[in-house]
């Protein structure tokens, strides 16, 4: 057989084998809708308690580590804690993002409780980001509470692709910044600050992709296989990273942590960031009064209030935190943007034509409860 013909036949056999394997095996990502919350617990949780804590856990967190736990003190009385096994020392050495994520969890908790007719009384216990006990919360039945629409919690998600480039409409900016103008800043894609943030986001991602401590930490939180995803119910799945179809299937079946450390993977992630920043209405920045635990929790709550109300306007958010995480870029940030207060979130924003449903996983409530 001629060499060229042999290669052609061998090539098609590989493709056929690949397609056959694809058809008979893992065809799609394991997503949130697939997960069944059937775990049992020794904790005497009431149905309302379980529902409220589940909705709280739909909060966003860096690498989807879900860095919270809940200590059950008694019925409707819990301590919300900081799980140090879920910290990200490679990108968040001071646990700033951990506390912001716990703040988002608290906002969901408060809204979910109000939906079921409970009032929350929070009492901050932590004085530094590393403290284990962050806040205690007591829920009491109340009348006349504003009933929050929990569909907004269920349908919130991070979106990373297919942003339109139209700037935000005036009325939508007022809606987003409503009573938060001191802390939320919109930089449209026509501004020079927007351009600076685009360039520095690419630069910070380049620095981070080649910093092994950050990259191996990322590798530990990517759940390539559906089996891994179903087992851990946390981290970054391919569906969450919006890698579907044949590329998703290929990565799910043939990729693992070691591939993340390869030059080709690092390069591809930077290329993806270049494409992402080229699509947006601009950036939203969220600042805080200072860097205290209280201010960080409040900022996480503020992020969540904003995030929960944008889907109904077809507006998406994508936190891109690398500028803050990398020293070389973070030291230039405030001066270059002309903001004095600490900048806690850098969020790419924009309109979407089609808004996808959430797919990122969450651990069942029982797994983050402690006695
Ligand atoms: C503090 C914080 C930092 C984050 N940083 C990034 C980031 O740099 N890049 C990114 O793509 N997503 C980032 N995210 C989004 C999370 O990856 C996302 O919330 C998580 O995977 C869960 O997905 P969901 O938001 O769709 O529920 C961040 C979220 C938080 C709360």
Image (tube, rainbow, N blue to C red):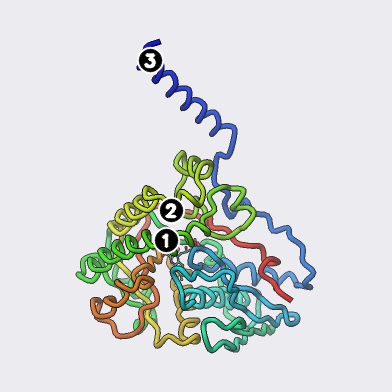
- The mark nearer the N terminus, 1 or 2, is 1
Q: Are marks 1 and 2 in contact (CB under 8 Å)?
A: yes
Give me the C-alpha separation between circle 2 and circle 3: 37 Å
Give me the C-alpha separation between circle 1 and circle 2: 8 Å
Q: Is residue 338 left or right of residue 298?
A: left
Q: Is residue 144 visible?
A: no
Badge 2: residue crowd in 10 Å (few <14, some 14–19, many ≥20):
some
Q: Are marks 2 and 3 in contact (CB under 8 Å)?
A: no
**Quarter holding residue 210:** bottom left
Number of numbered tags placed on the structure image: 3
Between marks 1 and 3 in the image, the one whose residue lies nearer the viewer = 1
Between marks 2 and 3 in the image, the one whose residue lies nearer the viewer = 2
- Position of the N terminus, as image quadrant, is top left
Asked whether mark 3 lies closer than 8 Å to ligand 1, one says no
Location of mark 3 (residue) = 5
Q: Can you name the residue that lies furthest to the top here?
A: 1
- The mark nearer the N terminus, 2 or 3, is 3
Q: Position of residue 160 (x, y in %)?
A: 40, 57
Q: Is residue 73 above or below residue 83?
A: below
Q: Secondary structure at mark 1?
A: helix
Location of mark 1 (residue) = 212
Q: Position of residue 251 (x, y in %)?
A: 48, 44
Q: Is residue 243 left or right of residue 55?
A: left
Of the numbered discs in the image, which one, if any, rests on residue 261? 2
The residue at 66%/63% (across/down) is 364
Q: Is residue 112 above or below residue 213?
A: below
């Amino acid at each position: 057989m001629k060499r060229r013909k042999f290669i052609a036949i061998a090539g098609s056999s590989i493709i056929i084998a690949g397609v056959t394997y694809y058809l008979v095996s893992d065809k799609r990502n394991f997503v949130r809708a697939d997960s069944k919350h059937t775990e049992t617990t020794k904790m005497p949780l009431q149905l309302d308690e379980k529902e409220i804590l589940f909705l709280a856990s739909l909060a966003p967190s860096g690498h989807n580590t879900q860095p919270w736990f809940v200590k059950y003190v008694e019925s409707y009385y819990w301590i919300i804690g900081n799980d140090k096994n879920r910290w990200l020392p490679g990108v968040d050495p001071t646990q700033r993002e951990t506390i912001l994520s716990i703040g988002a969890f608290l906002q969901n908790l408060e809204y979910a409780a109000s939906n079921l007719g409970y009032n929350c009384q929070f009492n901050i216990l932590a004085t530094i980001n590393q403290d284990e006990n962050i806040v205690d919360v007591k829920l009491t039945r109340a009348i006349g509470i504003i009933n929050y629409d929990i569909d907004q919690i269920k349908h919130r998600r991070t979106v990373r692709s297919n942003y339109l480039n139209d700037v935000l409409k005036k009325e939508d900016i007022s809606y987003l910044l409503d009573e938060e103008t001191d802390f939320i800043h919109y930089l449209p894609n026509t501004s020079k600050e927007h351009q600076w943030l685009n360039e520095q986001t690419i630069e910070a991602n380049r620095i981070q992709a080649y910093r092994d401590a950050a990259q191996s930490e990322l590798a530990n939180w990517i759940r390539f296989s559906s089996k891994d995803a179903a087992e851990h119910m946390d981290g970054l799945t391919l569906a969450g990273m919006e890698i579907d179809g044949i590329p998703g299937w290929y990565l799910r079946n043939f990729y693992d942590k070691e591939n993340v450390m390869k030059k080709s993977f690092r390069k591809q992630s930077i290329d993806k960031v270049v494409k992402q920043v080229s699509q947006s209405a601009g950036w939203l920045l969220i600042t805080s009064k200072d860097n205290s635990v209280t201010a960080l929790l409040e900022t996480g709550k503020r992020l969540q209030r904003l995030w929960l109300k944008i889907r109904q306007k077809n507006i998406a958010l994508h936190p891109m935190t690398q500028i803050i995480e990398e020293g070389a870029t973070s030291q230039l940030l405030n001066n270059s943007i002309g903001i004095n207060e600490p900048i806690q979130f850098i969020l790419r924003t924009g309109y979407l034509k089609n808004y996808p449903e959430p797919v990122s996983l969450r651990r069942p409530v029982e797994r983050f409860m402690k006695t």
